Image (cartoon, helix red, strand yellow):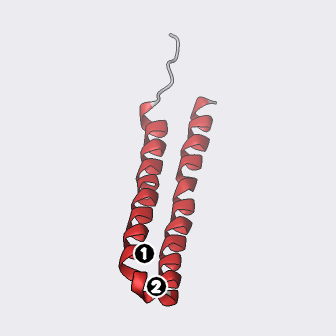
Amino acid sequence: MLEGVKSIGAGAATIALAGATIGIGNVLSSLIHSVVQNPSLAKQSFGYAILGFALIEAIVLFAPMMAFLISFIFRSHKKS
């Protein structure tokens, strides 16, 4: 039973990767729209886009780490 719950937990942790992919797409899409509307603020908008990209990328790195922790580190302690 514990192995099944661990698999569900690891799968749920990897779902964050799909959300992060959508988030990265939104950040870059917003950057393109803002540069098209106001080219004079392109440099400042690019800085904000890189900050947003970095924050989303942190989620992308933490999600597989949690999945691996759930799968391999947390082991069941069976009583002998």
Residue topped by disc 1: 45
Across and down, in percent, residue 62 comes to 43, 48
State the residue position of label 2: 35
Task: Report the label total.
Answer: 2
For mark 2, give the secondary structure.
Answer: helix
Q: Nearer the viewer, residue 12 or 38?
A: 38
Task: In the rendered structure, find residue 25 and report the number of the disc placed on it.
Answer: none
Q: Amino acid at mark 1?
A: Ser
Q: Is residue 79 left or right of residue 8?
A: left
At horizontal 54% and vertical 47% (from top left) the residue drawn is: 13
Mark closest to the chain's N terminus, 1 or 2: 2
Q: Position of residue 22 (x, y in %)?
A: 56, 68
Q: Residues within 10 Å of mark 2 (few under 14, many from 20)?
A: some
How crowded pointer 1 is (Cα within 10 Å; few <14, some 14-19, many 20+) is rated as some
Residue type at mark 2: give it. Val
Look at the picture and state if 32 lies above or below 6.
below
Q: Which residue is found at the position 37% from the left and 70% from the top? A: 47
| Element carrying mark 1 | helix
Are dots 1 and 2 in contact, CB under 8 Å? Answer: yes
Relative height, residue 28 to residue 75 (above, below): below
For the point 50% across and 81% down, which residue is it? 34
